[in-house]
Structure formats: C-alpha cells, structure tokens
C-alpha cells in the first residue's frame, strides 16, 4: 500500500483542482474504485463535482469523507517547486493539497481497495464521499448532498473525515466535534460631514467602536462545555472613511465571526448580538452567514475504533478534542452520524510549500483500514 498511496497522491497533486474545479481527480478515483468492485455515482451540482462510491447494500454505513479541491497556491515563484508538480525532498512530498487533503483522499482509496479485497462479503456498507467545494462556498458540496441524502432516506452512521488534524506527529490529535461558525457583516450608518463641524455630522466609527469592543470583551459561555473551547468573538474587517483626512464618513462596515460551543445556536447568537448592539443605539443593518452549527461525537464505536487503531499501530493515545476551524463533518453530523476527523500534520496547510511527511502518508492507509475493520467487522463488540 505504501508506494501506491504515494503515487496516487502525486497524481492528485498534479491536477490543479483550485476550488471548485475538480480537474479530473474524482473520475480518476472513481475508476480505481470501480475496478475494486465499488459502485459510483457522480453528483454534480452547479459548478461543483461530488462523488459517492460505495460497497455493500445494508447498514451500518461507514463513510470516508474528503475533498479534492484546494486553495489557490498564490504566486508560483514563491514556492521552492511548482505547487502542482509534486516534489519529493528530504522525506516530504511537496505540493498544493499534499496535506489538505489529497494525501488523505489517496489513503482513503487505497484503504477502501484493501478492505474490500480482504473482506469481499463484509457486513454493512463502506463508502467514500468527495466534493470539490470544501475550500470554497461549501454550498453545492457536502452541505447539499447531505441534505439530499436525508430527503431520500439514505443514512450515514459513521463518518471518518480526512482533514489534517494532527499537530506535531501523525495521530496526536483527532477531532471529535467542531464549534459552530457564524459571520456577521454590520453596516453602521451615521451622517457624513466635515471634521471641523462634528456637531453637524454623526460619526459611525465613534458609535461602532464601544459597541463592538463590548462584544469582543464579553465572555460568551456561562460555563465550559465539555471537550469544547470557549465561544469566541473576533472582528475580521473594519472599513470606513472616504480617503480624506477632513471628512467624517457616513458609514462604517464591521465584519465579525463567532466560533461557538453547543451552549449556543446560530439563532440564539443572532438575537443576542442584535440585542447588545441595539442597546448602544446604533443605526445599522447586519447580513448574517451561518456556516454550520456545532457538533460533538460522544465516546462510542467510532471514537473507540480510532483510539484503538492509533494505540495498536502508532503506540499513542490521541488528544480527542474539538479545536480548529470547521470541516464538512458539520453537514454529516446532523444526519445522526458519529463523526471523527483524523489526518496528517496540519502545520503547512494553506501555506507556501505545503507538504506532507512521506512516512505519515504511507502510514495513513493502514490506519484507515484498521478503523474500517473495527467499525464494520467488530463494531458491535
């Protein structure tokens, strides 16, 4: 499996699949899985490619979840080698998507092939769901497919996400949930005027600063939520002014984000933020974007399978937490699935000279295979 996963990862990196362009990654993977006995279904929605591949016809359903799209590489001359020409150097494979997450996707496919070859009459269903819309708007990817599956009564019981979860060494951290994400863009309205005549104007910057400072200083959670970081509020962008030093602007725009624990829902946070801003007598409007609600997988079949596989294969016990950003697991969890994220070290993701350790890459298929065997062959133990 070792050389196979390295070769397949290199093939995927060589396809410049900048979101939402799949650039032929999914047909390549579908062909391999079809040759291994999987059935496949291409689910193109809008400009987004999605692939569902499965083996088996009954429950429970274990799904490996990943994405073939990558973020833009930026200027190619900033890289030590072409970002879409995979390069092996000193034990690492370099290229855009090597860690996030073409290495994991390749490892999924190699593990799926090995699982079916070893257990052709396995119980349950083992599957792969891929999208080209994880790094983009995440509208026509897993979010939409999960909704369609729910409407069709298609279940996913266990979901292993290949996002790069590890911090210093492979498997030291696995994600067992994620905070929710809510973004607001507030337009604060005032009255434009001359800075020498402030009594004839109404400065929206002056009005906005105390209100948003209060939001930033607030402790949002009444108490710690088990296995979750605290809810946080961060201002990402603040824009105002005409470019002239002698003009009070008429509007100010403030973009902010809340990453929130299960103490909150998006609707409750919207109501709370709007109430707090109203108390500052601001004239404003807010556009809200709900990225996803928080989810949490309690200790059970999938977490045990991941933990036991890492213990037996790597000799470590992972830190099981809910840190980091968001992942497409947030769309699968509402289906009632147990969701865990396990992937390579994330130190270089979205950066120039993104890379993955070859040793870690070669270890991943065995880990994913071991988890699948524990879930589907021994999950009831």
Image (tube, grey):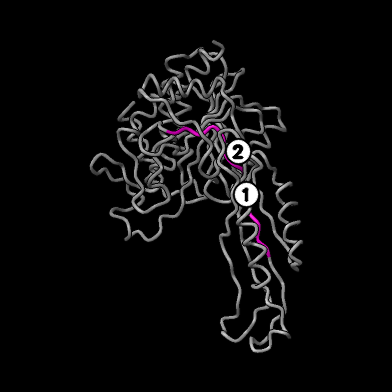
Give the mark nearest the N terminus, 2 or 1: 1
List the single residue furthest toward the top.
Answer: 381
Residue 148 percent across, percent down from the top left: 68, 36
Q: Residues within 10 Å of mark 1 (few under 14, many from 20)?
A: few
Magenta span covers which residues? 173-186
Residue 225 visible at all: yes
Residue located 59% across and 26% down the image: 298
In the image, 369 versus 191, the foreground residue is 191
Residue located 64% across and 50% down the image: 182
Identify the element where label 1 is drawn.
loop
In the depicted structure, whether residue 361 falls above or below residue 86: above
Identify the element where label 2 is drawn.
loop
The chief SS type of the magenta part is strand
Residue 202 percent across, percent down from the top left: 71, 78
Residue at mark 2: 224
Residue 161 percent across, percent down from the top left: 51, 33
Residue at mark 1: 219
Which label number is shown at residue 229? none
In-image side of 94 versus 120 (left or right): left
Quadrant position of residue 62 = top right
List the single residue furthest toward the left.
Answer: 90
Residue 264 percent across, percent down from the top left: 68, 42
* Quadrant in which the N terminus appears: top left
């Amino acid at each position: 499996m070792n050389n196979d996963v390295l070769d397949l990862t290199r093939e995927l990196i060589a396809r410049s699949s900048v979101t939402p362009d799949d650039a032929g990654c999914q047909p390549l993977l579908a062909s391999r899985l079809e040759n291994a006995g999987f059935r496949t279904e291409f689910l193109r929605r809008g400009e987004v490619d999605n692939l569902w591949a499965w083996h088996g016809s009954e429950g429970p359903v274990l799904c490996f979840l990943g994405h073939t799209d990558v973020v833009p590489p930026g200027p190619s001359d900033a890289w030590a080698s072409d970002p879409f020409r995979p390069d092996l150097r000193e034990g690492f494979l370099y290229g855009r998507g090597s860690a996030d997450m073409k290495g994991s996707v390749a490892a999924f496919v190699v593990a799926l092939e090995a699982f079916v070859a070893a257990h052709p009459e396995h119980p349950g269903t083992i599957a792969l769901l891929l999208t080209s819309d994880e790094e983009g708007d995440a509208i026509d990817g897993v979010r939409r497919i999960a909704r369609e599956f729910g409407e069709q009564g298609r279940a996913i019981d266990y979901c292993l996400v290949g996002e790069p979860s590890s911090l210093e060494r492979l498997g030291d951290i696995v994600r067992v949930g994620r905070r929710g994400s809510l973004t607001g863009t507030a337009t604060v309205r005032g009255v434009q005027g001359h800075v020498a005549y402030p009594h004839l104007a109404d400065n929206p910057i002056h009005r906005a600063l105390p209100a948003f400072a209060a939001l930033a200083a607030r402790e949002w959670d009444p108490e710690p939520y088990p296995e979750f970081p605290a809810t946080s509020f961060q201002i990402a962008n603040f824009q105002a002014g005409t470019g002239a030093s002698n003009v009070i602007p008429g509007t100010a725009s403030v973009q902010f984000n809340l990453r929130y624990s299960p103490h909150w829902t998006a609707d409750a946070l919207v109501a709370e933020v709007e109430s707090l801003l109203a108390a500052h007598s601001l004239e404003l409007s807010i556009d809200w974007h709900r990225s996803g609600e928080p989810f949490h997988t309690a200790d059970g079949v999938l977490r045990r399978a991941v933990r036991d596989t890492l213990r037996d294969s790597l000799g470590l016990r992972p830190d099981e937490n809910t840190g980091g950003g968001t992942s497409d697991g947030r769309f699968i969890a509402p289906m009632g699935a147990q969701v865990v994220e396990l992937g390579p070290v994330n130190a270089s993701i979205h950066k120039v000279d993104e890379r993955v350790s070859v040793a870690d890459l070669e270890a991943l298929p065995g880990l994913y295979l071991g988890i699948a065997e524990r879930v589907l062959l021994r999950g009831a133990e």
